[in-house]
Image: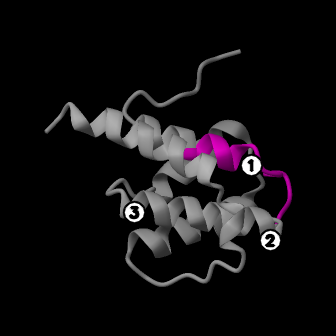
Amino acid sequence: MVNIKDKNMPAVIEKALDYIGGMNTSASTPHSMDESTAKGIFKYLKELGVPVSTEDVTARANQEGWNAEFTKKVAGWADKIESGNRVLIKNPEYFSSYMQEQLRALAEAEYSHTE
């Protein structure tokens, strides 16, 4: 298997996209649990100062063969959140504290040495 990780992409964004890649990406519409999780991830990363861009989502989706409609929806959420627009997260509890801890640790490890 070829390593498709983008060496220029921050590890925290790679991990976030790994979580999203673990969803049913072959569906045209994300399950409501997956929608809440993805939006929670994007919102949290923006709060950490590492927003996920539409390009990040699209690049991963193309590499992994996600459904085009799934990709369009998820990339749209990333764009809305990156742009500072409000999004409704219907079930915020689906974005688990475990995911938050993992993402925060990666962000801190990656950006603490650059300050």
Spot occupied by residue 35 in the image (x, y as percentages of width and height): 71, 68
User: Residue 59 colored magenta?
Assistant: no
Label 2 is placed on what type of residue? Answer: Ser
User: In this view, which residue lies farthest toward the left?
Assistant: 115
Q: Earlier in the sequence, mark 1 or mark 3?
A: 3
Please provide percent x and percent y for residue 87.
Answer: 55, 81
Check disc 2 and report its element: helix, strand or loop: helix
Residue identified by numbered label 2 = 32
**Height in image: 53 above or below 109?**
below
N-terminal of the two: label 1 or label 2?
A: 2
Mark 1 residue type: Trp
15 left or right of 109?
right
The residue beneath circle 1 is 66
Farthest-out residue, top:
1
Quick one: label 3 or label 2, which is nearer the N terminus? 2
- On the image, which quarter does residue 91 sit in? bottom right
Q: Which image quarter is the C terminus in?
A: top left
